[in-house]
Amino acid sequence: MHERGTGMRTKWALGVAAMITGLAALSARPAAAETNSEQAEALIHQGVELRAHDQTARALPLFEKAYQISRTPRTAAQLGLCELELARYVDAQRHLLEALASPDHPWIAKNRATLVRQLDAAAANVGELALTVSPAEADILLNGKPIDRSLAGSSIRLPKGPVDVEVRAAGYQLAHETITIRGGHREQRTFTLAPEPARQVALATSLEAPRPASSAEMNLSTAPPPPAGQRARSERIAAWITGGVALGALALGTAEAFNAASKRDAFNSHTSVEGGAVVQDCGTAALNAACKPLKDSYGTALTLSVVGFASAAALAATSAVLFRFSSGNGGNSESSGVPGAFACVPELGVRGLGCVLRF
């Protein structure tokens, strides 16, 4: 009997404790709500005081915090009014619209006329921009800042004035346009990105139906491509230039050959008077002061003549090769139908060049 009474008292105590705990929890919620409301009201009061003393920029964080703590029509309205004063028209329009969406709220009803005028002022400085973008995965940047792709196709609220729109995607050419946003108006633009040149070639290649290559095509695929027209023109120009330089070298060699012959004759015929008799004095082993310059001049002229003729020969051969290849075929002229080449080379034992025209 004693144990039964003890159990009943234990159950009764647990029930009372549970009831007290429930009542405490129920009473704590209104208290917390009341505390948030009081905090928001205190922040609003501080913000209004700052705005009254022309310190709107310092008041903005207070209104934002009040709005976060207690999102009510009154906190939304106070935040919107502060943003409007700071020319943050898009945010001001959004928060004032939120406040006026509750016309039955006592504070909103009392200040409705003022809030409507301020909303009109904000709307006059806000326009809308609707974008249609292709491809859909393209990135959109407004004034250099990326926006959510989901906003493409919907109206984006922007403050009036110019806005730089940039649309980019990997493998596509960038698109850019500066659009002037007008207050209370809606602008609409469509951006279709063009593939980059390399991507266009790849797409065109992928659209071609593949077919197996024949053995002849496989053999031809290893052959070098024929020279382009531009290459032929360049080779022809180089051939003319080389030929002109060869003619200059030939002229130099010829002139110096005659000069060397003149110096040789002057050396061999130089005379002096010895013991009353005229003698040729440059044939001796010991050259005098008059004969040595003649011999040196002869040697220099002979060297220049040889260099001129050798250079002319090499340049002429190069010019002939360039002329042949610039005609479109580097093979023999008999099999290709390409005109023959004209070339000049020095002939040993003879002053000058021997020129041959081959067909």
Image (cartoon, helix red, strand yellow):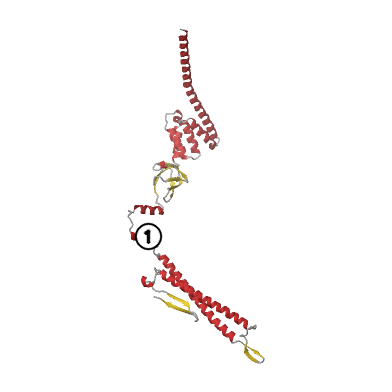
Number of numbered markers: 1
Image position of 296 (left or right of 152)? right
Identify the image quadrant of the C terminus: bottom left
Which residue is at a point 50% across and 36% down the rendered structure image?
Answer: 82
Q: Pick the residue in front: 132 or 46.
A: 132
Picture quarter containing residue 127?
Answer: top left
In the image, residue 261 lies at what x, y percent?
Answer: 55, 83
Q: Is residue 336 left or right of residue 65?
A: left
Residue where numbered disc 1 is placed: 221
Residue 36 seen by the camera? yes
Q: Residues within 10 Å of mark 1 (few under 14, many from 20)?
A: few
Quadrant hosting residue 335: bottom left
- Residue 206 in the image: state x and y as whole percent: 36, 52
Q: Position of residue 255 (x, y in %)?
A: 53, 80
To which quarter of the image does residue 101 belong? top left
Q: Which secondary structure lies at badge 1?
A: helix
- Which residue does the image show at 43% across and 77% down from the upper left? 356
Q: Amino acid at mark 1?
A: Ser
Q: Position of residue 147 (x, y in %)?
A: 44, 42
